[in-house]
Every structure is written in C-alpha cells, then in structure tokens.
Image: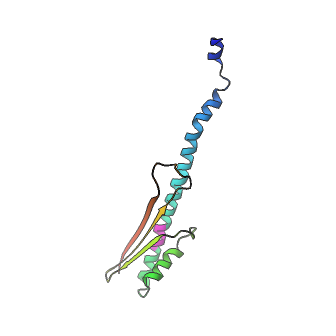
Amino acid sequence: MIRRLTTCRRASTTVEFAILLPVMLGFMFGIIEFGRAMWIKQTLQYAVESASRTALADATLGAGAISGAVSAALLGLQGLNPVITVTSSPTQITVAASYNFTFLVPNLLPFGPITLTAQSNLPR
C-alpha cells in the first residue's frame, strides 16, 4: 500500500501548477506595473521638456500657460493630474512635474505609491 502511494504521480502536475501559479502571476503583474511606471515617467519627462522649450521660445508665457503646455503634452495620459512647478529667473527656466503612481494590483509590492518626478532646466 505505501509502495503504491509513493510511486503514484497522477496529481503531481496539478500540485506543481498550484504552487507556481501565484509566483508566475506575481512576476507577470510586476512586469506590467513596472512597464506602466516607466511609461508614465517617460511621458512626464517628455511633457516637461516640451513645455520648457515652448517657454524658452515664447518668453511672454506665464506659469499657468506653461503648466497647461505640460498637461497638453501628456500623450495618452489625459486623466493624469501631476503637480506642476514652474520656476523662472532671468538666466534659467525650470519646469518640474511629480505624480504619485499607484499600482493597479494592490499589495503586489510591499511598499505603497511611488512618486514619479520629471524636471527640465533650460538656460535663457
């Protein structure tokens, strides 16, 4: 009887699948979330650089118009509301944006939201 139980392998694939499925799903969703975070970070950087070049080309633009240019340049992320900071001096213009990135899958990683930042400094 014991010999027959130790040689039986009928459900071993099911048990291995049940053990590995959560690990594989964790890796898969982790890769998806990391890709989303990098996409938003790069889009923020593009928007900030585009707005700072626009402000450099037209010195009469105010901080509100530059913030609007950042929001308009967020390609594919129209619902995103980053915190935009515009600092202008006679020698340089600085445009910065930050966004609190929250994961779509809660409790996937042991830490909470990540703050994504982008900044562009251009001399006048």
Q: Nearer the viewer, residue 26 or 75?
A: 26
Q: Magenta segment, which residues?
A: 44-49
Residue 15, by quadrant, is top right
Q: How many marks?
A: 0
Q: Residue at x 58, y 44 (%)?
A: 25
Check if residue 47 falls in the magenta segment: yes
In the displayed structure, does residue 79 sit left or right of residue 62? right
Across and down, in percent, residue 92 comes to 34, 78
Farthest residue toward the left? 91
- Relative to 25, residue 59 above or below: below
- Relative to 117, residue 67 above or below: below
Farthest residue toward the right? 10
- Relative to 5, residue 79 above or below: below
Q: Nearer the viewer, residue 111 or 33?
A: 111
Q: Residue at x 49, y 59 (%)?
A: 38
Secondary structure character of the magenta stretch overall: helix
Q: Residue at x 51, y 74 (%)?
A: 71
Q: Residue at x 58, y 68 (%)?
A: 76
Colour logic: rainbow
Across and down, in percent, residue 80 comes to 54, 68
The quarter in which the C terminus is drawn is bottom left
Q: Nearer the viewer, residue 3 or 50?
A: 3
Across and down, in percent, residue 23 comes to 55, 40
The quarter in which the N terminus is drawn is top right
In the displayed structure, does residue 116 sit left or right of residue 105? left
Across and down, in percent, residue 74 comes to 53, 71
- Relative to 105, residue 6 above or below: above
Check if residue 122 falls in the magenta segment: no
